[in-house]
Image: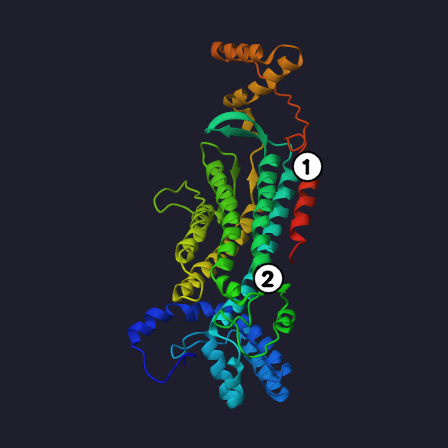
Amino acid sequence: MKLWDKGFSTDQKIDHFTVGNDRELDLLLAKYDVIASKAHAKMLGDVGLITKDESEDLVRELDSIAKTIDGGTFTIEDSFEDMHSKIEFLLIEKLGNTGKKIHTARSRNDQVLVAMQLYLKNELTEIKSEVRILFDLLLDLAETHRSTLLPGYTHLQIAMPSSFGLWFSAYAESLIDDLYFVNAAYKIADQNPLGSAAGYGSSFPVDRTSTTKEMGFTTMKYNVVAAQMGRGKVEKAAAFGISSIASTLSKLAMDICLYMSQNFDFITFPDELTTGSSIMPHKKNPDVFELIRAKCNKIQAVPNQLVLITNNLPSGYHRDLQLVKEVIVPAIQDIKACLELMHFSLKEIKVNDKILEDPKYNYLFSVDTLNELVKNGMPFRDAYKKMGAEIEAGTFQPKKDIHHTHEGSLGNLCLEEIREKMKGITDHYI
């Protein structure tokens, strides 16, 4: 069944090409199409386009369909083009002519728009929750290991003292920046497009305010052409949000892989979180973190994919837009999996608290030793030359009793301030 069926057949090859993997993706979106259809059915009854009894019958059967979706028994067979056609078929099967009235005053275009935006609102909210869980773990680890020193590197050369407290809380605070993008994407998605139909509105006297309220949107996308132009743009905004999170996770995963190396030996994980080699019995490979790194790097390409699909399309609907679904939906599932696995694994991390006993890390303290000379009255440039000469001559004696006090330094991590900042960002749009 196709919603646009005019009574003649389409070549099977063309059908397969145009439908693609919509059926599989629509299994994730079907519950949102039902939510939107219920709001639409109620509105049709309220404005008199169908009777109250017809409206109530549609809502009742849509509730039954929702139960099959929640129970995992809802399917979209090959004879149906997508979730919309299957849901409408079920309504007609149960209600006859009343089922045929559900499509009054709407188009498959605004059906897709509203289902996707409801889906994105829900998924972005869940992603924020997963980020918050990881954030809390990172700050707890920062508190636990706040005094354990860690070599800081620039250019992959030994640079200055850092700490595990700084390292963990750095990634925690970076996640806050990522959520600014996620919140922006949520706000864009939180605009009801239902009622825009094929992108030019309808001659039916629909009540878009009532469907906006019924579905829990904060506002509507008022201009019907602007609503249609949101298709692809909303997904792109979500993609920028999740790609920002992916950038943070990828960098963290890379640090973990590096720090697990025997050449660094800064951290370890239990055997069950690593893998072995088929021929080297000593190996403990960080496969989980390597896959998080790779998946997150792949996710960072998603905004560009969506740009290339949508950037030269004129206003109005084009079939190109079908492809945005197959790009954004898997990316959202991947970022949720990466967040979950990062938290699951990172809570088992074991920190080496004896790293700086290795004499090669003495040079970490050259800047602090230099600064001590400056605080005692020596001009900075003279102190820099003196320190350089001592290092060159092999007479450098590091001052290891470092004392960093400014906000955000290893002696003053400002963990509570970072928690408050996260509280401010996660309290929005949830």
Q: Nearer the viewer, mark 1 or mark 2?
A: 2
Residue 414, disc: 1
**Along the viewing direction, whichever of 127 and 209 lies nearer the viewer:** 209
Q: Where 87 falls versus 351 (above or below)?
A: below
Residue 304 at what x, y percent from top left?
42, 51
Residue under the point 67% across and 12% down: 376
Relative horizontal placement of residue 83, taking residue 398 as reference (left or right)? left
**Mark 1 nearby-residue class (10 Å; few <14, some 14–19, many ≥20):** some
Quarter of the rendering containing residue 31 = bottom right
Element under label 1?
loop
Q: Amino acid at mark 2?
A: Asp
Residue under the point 43% across and 56% down: 306
Residue under the point 49% across and 62% down: 229
Q: Where 391 falls versus 21 (above or below)?
A: above
Cα–Cα span, label 1 and label 2:
34 Å
**In which quadrant of the rendered image does the C terminus lie?**
bottom right
Residue 387 at what x, y percent from top left?
54, 12
**Mark 2 nearby-residue class (10 Å; few <14, some 14–19, many ≥20):** many
Reading the image, the residue beneath label 2 is 190
Residue 173, disc: none
Residue 25 at what x, y percent from top left?
45, 67
Residue 397 visible, this orientation: yes
Residue under the point 41% across and 41% down: 283
Q: Are marks 1 and 2 in contact (CB under 8 Å)?
A: no
Residue 149 at what x, y percent from top left?
59, 30
Please report whichever mark, 1 or 2, sits nearer to the chain's N-terminal start: 2
Element under label 2?
loop
**Along the viewing direction, whichever of 335 and 428 lies nearer the viewer:** 428
Relative horizontal placement of residue 352, taking residue 407 as reference (left or right)? left
